[in-house]
Image (cartoon, rainbow, N blue to C red):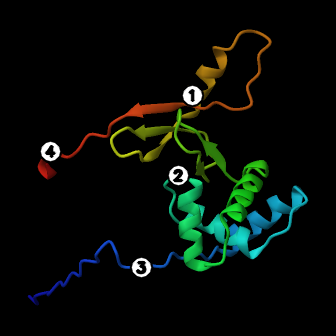
């Protein structure tokens, strides 16, 4: 039997690791189609900002998107990031996630789902919602009411692994 030597390298937090800001052809086509339907054009700035949202799906705030996008386009302004995100929301490409007095966050997951906000870390996690639950919730509406969307947010703390404490 042959032995294996594994070597690991720890990367300090301060090392700059550029984000992969390239969209797949399908992602780029979807972006271009949604923008076109809304009478908007695909720009390099929009492509980079959208890529940031898809690359790390951690529900970033505007400031986080701005910092990540500047790794690929240092001259990008905060106003441009705001405008891109507003356009994506109006085109139905991303959803805004709001938790009480927190900064607005952005979610590219357009499937029906809930959000769980970890009060200890501030992280927001997607929680899949089975279709039966959505149907049950819709059935609770009074007669004559019709819903276009349902937003469910959970607040709490994720359990830590006792072995890591």
Helix or strand or loop: what does disc 4 sit on? helix
User: Which comes before the other along the chain, label 1 or label 2?
Assistant: 2
What residue is shown with label 1? 132
Point out residue 18 in the picture as x, y percentages from the top left corner.
48, 79
Q: Distance between the residues labelled 2 and 3?
A: 21 Å
Helix or strand or loop: what does disc 1 sit on? helix
Q: Are marks 1 and 3 in contact (CB under 8 Å)?
A: no
User: Which comes before the other along the chain, label 4 or label 3?
Assistant: 3
Q: Do the residues labelled 1 and 4 touch (CB within 8 Å)?
A: no
Q: Are marks 1 and 2 in contact (CB under 8 Å)?
A: no
Q: Distance between the residues labelled 4 and 3?
A: 32 Å
Q: Is residue 116 above or below residue 88?
A: above
Residue 16 bears which disc, if any? 3
Instruction: Decide which of 51, 137 is in the foreground and name it.
Output: 51
Horizontal side of 59 relative to 90 (left or right) equals: left
Nearer to us: label 4 or label 3? 3
Helix or strand or loop: what does disc 3 sit on? loop
Structural crowding at the residue carrying mark 4, measured as other residues with C-alpha within 10 Å and reported as few (<14), some (14–19) or many (≥20): few
User: Which comes before the other along the chain, label 1 or label 4?
Assistant: 1
Nearer to us: label 2 or label 3? 3
Nearer to us: label 2 or label 4? 2
Q: Distance between the residues labelled 1 and 2?
A: 26 Å
Horizontal side of 35 relative to 88 (left or right) equals: right
Picture quadrant of residue 70? bottom right
Q: How far apart are marks 2 and 4 (CA)?
A: 27 Å
Structural crowding at the residue carrying mark 2, measured as other residues with C-alpha within 10 Å and reported as few (<14), some (14–19) or many (≥20): many
Q: Distance between the residues labelled 1 and 3?
A: 45 Å
Nearer to us: label 1 or label 4? 4
Helix or strand or loop: what does disc 2 sit on? loop
Point out residue 67 in the picture as x, y percentages from the top left corner.
54, 67
Residue 162 bears which disc, if any? 4
What residue is shown with label 2? 59
């Amino acid at each position: 039997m042959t032995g294996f030597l594994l070597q690991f390298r720890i990367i300090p937090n301060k090392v700059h690791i550029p984000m992969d800001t390239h969209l797949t052809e399908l992602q780029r086509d979807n972006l271009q189609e949604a923008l076109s339907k809304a009478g908007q054009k695909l720009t390099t700035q929009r492509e980079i900002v959208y890529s940031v949202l898809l690359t790390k799906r951690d529900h970033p705030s505007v400031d986080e998107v701005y910092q990540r996008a500047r790794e690929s386009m240092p001259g990008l302004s905060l106003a441009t990031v705001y405008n891109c995100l507003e356009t994506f929301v109006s085109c139905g490409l991303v959803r805004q996630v709001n938790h009480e007095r927190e900064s607005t966050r952005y979610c590219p997951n357009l499937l029906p789902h809930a959000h769980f906000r970890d009060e200890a870390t501030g992280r927001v996690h997607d929680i899949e919602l089975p279709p039966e639950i959505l149907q049950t919730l819709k059935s609770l509406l009074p007669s004559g009411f019709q819903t276009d969307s349902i937003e469910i947010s959970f607040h709490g703390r994720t359990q830590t692994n006792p072995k890591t404490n």
